[in-house]
Image: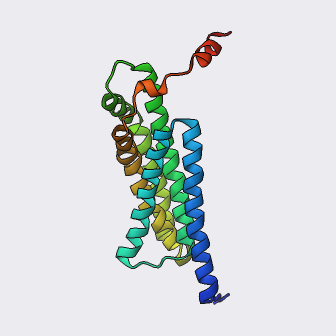
Amino acid sequence: MRRVEFVGPQVGEELRDDGGLAVVYALIGILIYVAFRFEYRFALGSVVALIHDVILTIGFFSVTQAAFDLTVLAAVLAVIGYSLNDTIVVFDRIRENFRKLRKEESIDVVNISINQTLARTLMTSITTLLVLFALFFVGGEVIHSFALALIVGVLVGTYSSIYVASATLILLNVSAVDLLPDEKEEVLDDLP
């Protein structure tokens, strides 16, 4: 044994509280970012999907009674970033298709957009999972819980990017009218 560390209950409680606050602050920052980048309904859809991911990832550790430590908390933050990236790719395609397919119903535009990004989403998730399984089986005990949290998070995040975030958009009645560019933007686009 090279090194032994002991964290007392006071320090452990402080680290747990600070980690929980970091997750909440990350979700608030993401809400603001996506609201500016897209539209507030897209922001709500992405945060609903991210909360879904966090709850299911932490819930997995609760149900299986696996050890939940600071490395798992770091993995949960990484899952938020990974899932947000996936969701942004899907949302970007939805936004593009709403502008292209103005005559289509909202549910059809979302369905077309998901189908267009499905191969990319699945390939990204599969290649990420290959690396995570290698870390899980070969990485050793230190990285075992981190890799497990990321495996669960990638699976849940892929599911939520496709089904939870997009379904939330439909529930919030997003339509092509909401995403039409302002007249000023159209004039600027016409300039050489």
Residue 52 in the figure: left or right of residue 186: left
Quadrant containing the N terminus in the rendered view: bottom right
Q: Residue 99 in the image: state x and y as whole percent.
A: 46, 22
Quadrant containing the C terminus in the rendered view: top right
Q: Residue at x 56, y 71 (%)?
A: 71
- What colouring method underlies this structural image? rainbow
From this view, report whether residue 180 is shown above or below residue 81.
above
Give the mark count: 0
Residue 179 in the figure: left or right of residue 156: right
Q: Residue at x 58, y 74 (%)?
A: 17
Q: Residue 189 in the image: state x and y as whole percent.
A: 62, 15
From this view, report whether residue 150 is shown above or below residue 162.
below
* Closer to the camera in the image, 38 or 172: 172
Q: Residue 59 in the image: state x and y as whole percent.
A: 39, 69
Q: Residue at x 59, y 44 (%)?
A: 33
* Closer to the camera in the image, 119 or 190: 190
- The image quadrant of residue 165 is top left
Q: Residue 149 in the image: state x and y as whole percent.
A: 47, 66
From this view, report whether residue 48 is shown above or below residue 185.
below
Q: Residue at x 65, y 89 (%)?
A: 4
Residue 108 in the figure: left or right of residue 145: left
